[in-house]
Image (cartoon, grey):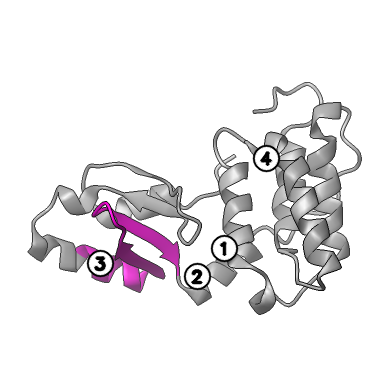
Amino acid sequence: MNTLPQAEVRALLQTRGFVRAAVQTDALLVTDVCLRMPREEQAKCLLRCAQAGFRVWHNEQGLWLVDPNDARWRQLWDAWQGYADCGIPDDYALMDVYALARLLAAHPAPFGEQPKTMLRALLKSCDGKGTIATTAASDLQAFAEALRLHQPLPSAAAGLLFAWLQEHRKGENHK
């Protein structure tokens, strides 16, 4: 499942280099293209990214971190809101993901109050390798603790998780 805007960011950068999920919790993507282009080209590249709704800044290793601005962030999550509960999965290994999706759907929060760090982590874990199947149990614990503390949950991710589950239904290999 392709949840991160890697292809779009790669096209905006218009150069070779990697664009992948960031390890940092405050950004979706990281890229090394800033090390591969002249400074004058970097300014044009940063402008293209800003116009497309992406913030870009340097990390401590000199790489660029990329994250959507607020408007683009909302647009990204709106795309997942059309997915609804797809029913209990036949594959027991997906039960924690299903429980997580149901928990998030049951506790909606205003979008502006939802923790972006948690939203980013869920986006990253549903992308590519699909690590959500292995992190869902610990996510359930963290979100239950947040509920006990009356903190908003990243409820916008419910649709993302239901979409991920639909893609990994019985008969398909889950990642």
Earlier residue among tags 1 and 3: 3
Residue identified by numbered label 4: 132
**Given this view, does label 4 or label 2 mark the residue nearer the observer?**
4
- Secondary structure beneath label 1: helix
Which span of residues is magenta-colored? 45-68
Q: Identify the residue at image location x=81%, y=25%.
A: 170
* 10 Å crowding of disc 3: few (<14), some (14-19), many (20+): some
Three-letter amino acid code of the residue under disc 2: Arg
Q: Is residue 37 magenta?
A: no
Q: Identify the residue at image location x=33%, y=65%.
A: 56
**Given this view, does label 3 or label 4 mark the residue nearer the observer?**
4
CA–CA distance in space, label 3 to label 4: 31 Å
Q: Identify the residue at image location x=38%, y=60%.
A: 66
- Examine the rendered structure and indicate whether residue 75 appears above or below residue 127: below
Three-letter amino acid code of the residue under disc 4: Ile
- Examine the rendered structure and indicate whether residue 72 appears above or below residue 103: below
Closest to the observer, 41 or 97:
97
Q: Position of residue 136 (x, y in %)?
A: 74, 42
Residue identified by numbered label 2: 72
* 10 Å crowding of disc 4: few (<14), some (14-19), many (20+): many
Q: Identify the residue at image location x=28%, y=67%.
A: 48
Please identify the quadrant where the N terminus is shown: top right
- Secondary structure beneath label 2: helix
The mark found on residue 76 in the picture is 1
Residue identified by numbered label 3: 46
Apparent side of residue 34 relative to residue 126 in the rendered image (left or right) = left
Q: In which quarter of the image is residue 2?
A: top right
**Label pair 2/1, CB-CB below 8 angstroms:** yes
